[in-house]
Image (cartoon, coloured by chain):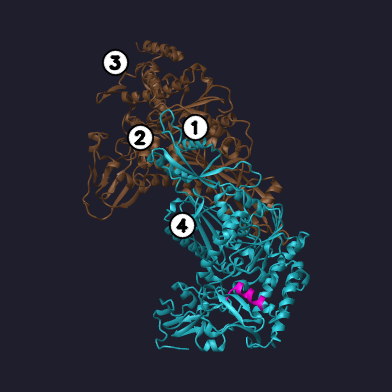
Chain colours: A brown, B cyan
Amino acid sequence: MPRNTSGRTGKKKRVLFQPANIEVLVEPGANLREVAMLAGVRLIASCGGAGTCGTCRVEIKEGEVETTRTARLTDAEFARGMRQACQSRVLTDLVVNVPVESRLETAVLAREQKGRAAAQKGVEALATGWRFNPPLAKYYLELPPATLTDNTSDLSRLLRGLRQEYKLSHMTVDFEVVKKLPTLLRQSDWKVTVTTLVTAIEPKGNAKRRPRLVNVEGGDTRDNHYAIALDIGTTAVKMQLLDLKKGRVVAEGSDYNGQIDYGSDVITRIAYCQKPGGLEKLQQVVVGTINELIDRLLEESRVSRDDIGHLMTAGNTTMLQILLGLDPKYIRLAPYTPAATYVPPVKANSLGINLAEHVYLFASPLVASYVGGDIVAGAVAAGLHQTKKVTLYIDIGTNGEIVIGNSDWMVTAACSAGPAFEGGEIKHGMLASSGAIEGVTIDPATLEPTVSTIGGTKAKGICGSGLINTVSQLLETGIINQKGEFNYDLPTKRIRQSNDVYEYVLARAPETQINNDIVITAIDIDNLIRAKAAMYAGYQTVIKSVGMTMKDIEQVIIAGGFGSYIDVAKAITIGLLPDIPRDKFIFIGNGSLMGVRLSSYSTDIIDEMRRVADLMTNLELSENADFMNNYIAALFLPHTDSNAFPSVIRQLARTQKSGRRVAA
Amino acid sequence: MPRNTSGRTGKKKRVLFQPANIEVLVEPGANLREVAMLAGVRLIASCGGAGTCGTCRVEIKEGEVETTRTARLTDAEFARGMRQACQSRVLTDLVVNVPVESRLETAVLAREQKGRAAAQKGVEALATGWRFNPPLAKYYLELPPATLTDNTSDLSRLLRGLRQEYKLSHMTVDFEVVKKLPTLLRQSDWKVTVTTLVTAIEPKGNAKRRPRLVNVEGGDTRDNHYAIALDIGTTAVKMQLLDLKKGRVVAEGSDYNGQIDYGSDVITRIAYCQKPGGLEKLQQVVVGTINELIDRLLEESRVSRDDIGHLMTAGNTTMLQILLGLDPKYIRLAPYTPAATYVPPVKANSLGINLAEHVYLFASPLVASYVGGDIVAGAVAAGLHQTKKVTLYIDIGTNGEIVIGNSDWMVTAACSAGPAFEGGEIKHGMLASSGAIEGVTIDPATLEPTVSTIGGTKAKGICGSGLINTVSQLLETGIINQKGEFNYDLPTKRIRQSNDVYEYVLARAPETQINNDIVITAIDIDNLIRAKAAMYAGYQTVIKSVGMTMKDIEQVIIAGGFGSYIDVAKAITIGLLPDIPRDKFIFIGNGSLMGVRLSSYSTDIIDEMRRVADLMTNLELSENADFMNNYIAALFLPHTDSNAFPSVIRQLARTQKSGRRVAA
């Protein structure tokens, strides 16, 4: 390990990060991952700094750190200066190299954004029949000035105007409106624009809505009428700025959820919240991300901050509770209860969100601890509440969410698939950003691969969809069997053993950015099988719970950034998706953001969200015996029940035979 | 003027106030009235420190002040060291004597309190038929713990419990409840007490009420269930602590409104609010008074602050707007519009009131800038909304409020009577506290007076009711004529001239605390005539506006601390009250506080308040020609229209004749 002689003193130390070339001064003893966060250098840190994932590795080029060594680094790596940043403390001035595989880059988001945008048209077509009647509305009034014979109060005059001009009555009034009214009415010569909000979702059975008077402005401001749609993902935060007058998106953007520095999945985040000040910290961090996105969208669109009057959001239950400062502790503990399925609207600025005082944040209602408002919003965007077709709606990810049903009934479930789909716990796994191997074909004769990467660059690792494609090809070419075991006696150097584990070499060191062979190991394959088995067992269990079988599924809607990029045929081959006709699969991209956008445009959609959330019955899989049986039965490629995958079995018979023939 | 030699230096100066014996250190140049405020020495200061009223006079016993002299002090007074505190700046160490007539004492409040309490039984009887159904309610729940087969959200479980146990539905939920729910439910073993609030007054025509879930506590706390009733007067703030379980007052108290240091009437206060920071200052000051009263009541009753769940209040429009931080500017400017007649409930602690976070302040609805929620509350307490009798409801004071009507219709008006009824602008006028001359009889033969004072002490001055009694006696004995002019040739030394103004000596210097003769002057009498004329013209104008005459009045209800102490017969003699049978007058004391208390006990009463406020039609008298004519006609004792006061005219003929006979 390279060292210099600046020694251990109480003086501040310089830490230079390369290749970004960012330098910071820190106290000796500072945790190197935290130093990177301070410097704005984003490291992947799936475990949130516990030392268990090994994704935040950096190379110490100069200087000395004190490190707690874990099994995540080999002797060779350690010898050449690689360290887990989260396990290292700064002792001297440092020069630190951040290798590509440790860098969190924003390319993945841009890609999802594009994918989503492409899928968007399809979705708007799925949910139909809603009127354009935004919950936030503006009304212009020219009031008669007060006189001695008509000197009713300012508020009464305003309400009378709304009643006479717009037939609006039964208003509730925010106190802040009363506060600004007397001066405003006179300064603006009794011409004002009133903003009303249908107080989000009303309880069931309440026929008469009561709009809330949330703001009043001088003059006619009806042209300046905007709202924000916000999707808070565990990994990424996505935002659209909506023009409520014209009914269109005027700007959009996305960024990593700042909480990613504190762990990549909800469980790590919940654990962090149990530390003193942890919940407040994560709340501030995600608000920071939201505020940066707002700033960016405002700058891009040249919309004024004060013209944004509403903030609709959806996210998984943990993300929502942290944003609202609601301790997510009981989401993680059996029996897994969320604080609320319908959270009352809350002033956005009371959470630290940098919007005008009158802006309420409204969250899509949710179903359970692991079936959040993002699923409700997505299901509505996808028109599940309108179709008679029995539909399987899935959002594949570390936490896979499943909805089965139609306009009359819906059953939901969540299954913990593990991080394999997002590249986690995979030797060369990575998020779907530039350099990730995605396309993979293996020549059945030579067993040589042809790979393509996102962005067309040299390979850095394998993303989730690449992993599915790889395993599917390994299976079709007989390199692995249906248990996922390597046929290690095949005549190819691509299959080899390392540390007693078989692996297949997808890319040789010179073809990569990391100057190392990129491989897929038997352990990786096992992780993927467990992930897909969890998803499949989930569908099966839910379908059986309503007395149906997989054959009854009339359409499959795949939501989520990850889902948009999977190859249906290959996903069926490994048993991740059910073996039904390929034209019954529909991709909708980010259903959550779509649902939120639609609900910003239409109070009808808000009503549907509430109805759908109430309609959804959640099936808890975590201790469900049937689920466990189904899961074990699915630990096979594609499945132990070959009758469930007839087309795959036929195909495998064909390709493996042809492969063996060619090889022979 | 006594001086000492400590001289003018930059050093802090000692100011000793006597007889309270309170010393403070202040910067040289400090305003002496502000120094007194700092020392907690309360001076009467009707004009709020403008120098125009002369009520804050003090005697400089030692040391030197710099004074701007006004006409409020005679040469003799000035020579013996009397100064207006508000016009004086500290130059040296001082010993300052505060004469009794300048001291603001709390005795008056205790007296009003007693008067009110005595009158209370009668009032509760006036408003009848209301159910005991407080807007703030508590419900105890033992919820089934969450299980894997029933793991709905914590909030849904709570709402389900309320629905099943208490048939409560259509709740709106405060966000803070959601925030504390997860931990609380588990800590208290799923046994909780929920607090709901009927969100004050609902808009008209909304059949279905929607209670608001405002708080949740662990265990069964139904026995700890309190609310505060608050009456905010321009002069005094009165408070009751109510046990909502038992439906009784557990403690009560009152204090001067701290704003009294900034002027005695609403107009002075509104003017102060126009200074930079003025509104914020007055808001803080009245909140300070409220917080002190809360502390006192909590200590006395040993009730815990957190057990107070609601704050109902009423006050005149200016007091309410200042409390809420609503600029009262337009109350004073034509056409005199209040900010709102129905102010949305607001969190008490957002105003600085030291109560638990979940406590809402709800204000009685009001009618107009000078017909406030105190009148609405009082009218309901007095049962105006229930009676078929045509009723005149009056609250006599600097600002006199009038209601005429019954359960079907009500017309209101306000008339500015000036401060005479509260002892203002009367040479020896004072508030009704210890030492105030109240009872006065004048021997028709000798023209010698017999006076009695509040508290039975030596006389300090004359209070408003004493003034009415005095003038009535002066008239009956022929010392003054019906124009209020002195019959200066009568054979008595009690009538004399001072500075060209006639006066009658009520008490000789040795009989007084002030060592000065206490007199009533022709100017005082003139001020009283103008005050009573404004009130009477008010009734007349309103009655005529509905096509009735004074004869149609079936009962007169007199509200307010001052009203409780007036002698009906004598008030009729001077023409302050109409000449109708004496048994048609009812005194109800502080109707405002009563109404607020009743509304804390009964949602029915809240409904009636809203209905009454809507029912009331306000007649603006300030630029009403009929009112001006009536006013001029009433500038006579009892009135220029002797047909309107037949019993008085008969009595005067009798007594004046008998007086003259005896004297002859």
Q: Position of residue B629 (x, y in %)?
A: 76, 70
Q: Nearer the viewer, mark 2 or mark 3?
A: 3
Quarter location, residue A56: top left
Q: CA distance from mark 4 to mark 1?
A: 43 Å
Report the front residue among A217 and B538: B538
* Whole-percent x, y for residue B221 in the image: 43, 45
Q: Amino acid at mark 1?
A: Ile
For badge 3, the amino acid type reads Asp
Q: Nearer the viewer, residue B298 or A474?
A: B298
Q: CA distance from mark 2 to mark 3?
A: 30 Å
Q: Chain of mark 2?
A: A
Task: Point out the frontmost of discs 1 and 2.
Answer: 1
At label 4, the amino acid type is Asn
Q: Is residue B466 magenta?
A: yes
Magenta region: which residues? Answer: B462-473
Q: In the drawing, does residue B545 fall left or right of residue A261?
A: right
Q: Which mark is residue B354?
A: 4
* Marking on residue A375: 1
Q: Are marks 1 and 3 on the same chain?
A: yes
